[in-house]
Image (cartoon, grey):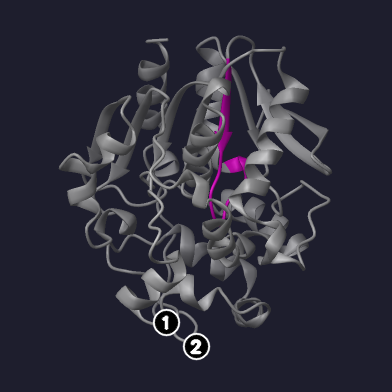
Amino acid sequence: MEGIEHKMVSANGLNIHIAEMGKGPLVLFLHGFPELWYSWRHQIVYMAACGYRAVAPDLRGYGDTTGAPTRDHTKFTVLHVVGDIIALLDAITREDEKVFLVGHDWGAYIAWQLCLFRPERVKALVNLSVAFMPRDPTRKMVETFREIYGDDHYVCRFQEPGEIEAELAKIGTKTVLKKFLSFRDPAPFYFPKGKGFGDSPITLPSWLSEEDLDYYASKFDCNGFTGGVNYYRAVDLHWELTAAWTGAKVNVPAKFIIGDLDLTYHIPGMKEYIHNGGFHKDVPLLQEVVVMEGVAHFINQEKADDISQHIYDFLQKF
């Protein structure tokens, strides 16, 4: 997109690709799966026009960021990725400069954890689609999903190295991305072994053009899906390594936005956690929760202008 600059930054043993636009206070955007910096294209332009320096990296294992050992999923815990982000901030900010943080999907999960580990680096946080998930000391995450949804749930299907990659390769990169990005069902996402996505046609949503899809596909064609899937494979290791943070609070001013058609909003117990006090207990400085009607998971692209305005309005308080 015109006006967005692309740079490579050496940080934490990686060559991290960032997209950047504007001058002013830094807003760092963290993408999810199966996405790229490109998912924030609308917000980058918007925030730059509002007097901010908008920066969006391709995360470890994604896009034009290189150097991650994708064959070793143990190098994809959130601790690794938070380390990447802190090293990136060290490289592109002034000493002691705090930044604004915005995350979606896995990027939101990473952003919560970054604020848990290093709150002194963040002025304020806006997270989309994935609420803070406090560590349950009695049960690992994959075990939890398997118990609730069974073996065909996508989180469970992603666990065996190489297996899901082979199935996705048979389907084709562009079709896989079209299916994920167009998913609007609040029901769980199942991916039964050997059955693909079925025979029903997949229609692109109005907010995603063929040109957009081609850009995503060009990057995943080069790198495959292993980098992104590795985040799911490392969640239980991350659980093991973060026992010291059981019960810890996120002490950063925060705003949370989710669509009422988002499958994450319909995880059993999630609505109660968000609205009945549990969320605020774990994130004491949570200032706003917004539930957008008729909106699904890829909220920052589906409702780009609304999300940009929400981000701007919140960051203006600081």
Above or below: residue 89 compared with residue 237 = above
- Image coords of residue 295 (percent x, y): 29, 47
Up-down relation of residue 57 to residue 167 (above or below): above
222 horizontally vs 317: left or right: right
Residue 111 appears at what percent x and percent y? 51, 38
Residue under the point 31% across and 28% down? 284
Q: Which mark is residue 152?
A: 1
Rendering quarter of residue 311? top left
Q: What is the magenta range?
A: 26-38
- In the foreground, 52 or 127: 127
Residues marked 2 and 1 touching at CB (< 8 Å): yes
Residue type at numbered disc 1 = Asp
Taking the spot 55% from the left edge, 35% from the top edge, the residue there is 117
Indicate the position of residue 108 as horizontal and vertical percent values: 47, 42
- For this orientation, the residue located farthest to the front is 244
| Residue 31 located within the stretch drawn in magenta | yes
Residue 233 located left or right of residue 262: right
What residue does disc 2 label?
193
